[in-house]
Image (cartoon, rainbow, N blue to C red):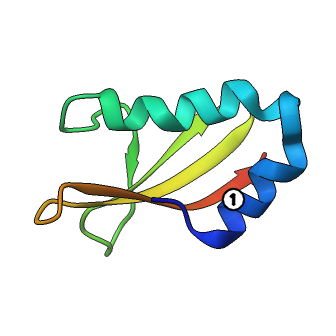
Amino acid sequence: MYARPVVAYLVTLRLAGHELREGIRAIAREDEPWVNDMAIQNRPGRFERLCRGHFIGYEVDQADKTIRVLYVQST
């Protein structure tokens, strides 16, 4: 699942964002725990990773087995 601002940002990147979108999709294919990603303090289940010059913030909902991409920010 993607937050609306994430979708809007990815659309603005068009073809240039292809590798970034693939990096986001890779999160879902990885096994837990996401040890290479930075856990967000005071926010259980939230992580951040650097991918293609962007910080990707996401949260994991274990009950629904869902990953929500909350933000994508250029470095």
Q: Is residue 11 visible?
A: yes
Question: Is 56 situated above or below 43?
Answer: above
| Quadrant in which residue 54 is drawn | top right
Q: Can you name the residue that lies furthest to the bottom here?
A: 42
Residue 42: x and y, percent? 31, 75
The residue located at (70%, 69%) in the rendering is 5
Q: Residue furthest left?
A: 63
Relative height, residue 50 to residue 38 (above, below): above
Q: Position of residue 69 (x, y in %)?
A: 50, 58
From the top left corner, tell me how far across and down residue 17 is, in percent. Answer: 78, 34
- Looking at this view, is 67 or 33 the one in front? 67
Q: How many marks?
A: 1
Q: Which residue occupies 79% across, 57% down?
A: 9
Residue at x-position 29% and y-position 28%: 30
Q: Nearer the viewer, residue 17 or 42?
A: 17
- Residue under pointer 1: 7
Quarter of the image holding residue 36? top left
- Classify 10 Å Cα crowding around label 1: few (below 14), some (14-19), many (20 and above): some
Q: Which part of the image, by quadrant, shows the C terminus?
A: top right
Residue 52, visible in the rendered structure: no
Whether residue 53 sits left or right of residue 62 in the image: it is right
x%, y% of residue 25?
48, 35
Q: Is residue 40 left or right of residue 62?
A: right
> Quadrant of the image for the N terminus?
bottom left
Drawn side of residue 58 relative to residue 66, left or right: right
Vertical relation: 71 (above or below) 26: below
* Disc 1 secondary structure class: helix
Residue at left offset 27%, top offset 57%: 66
Q: Given the image, on which type of amino acid does mark 1 rest?
A: Val
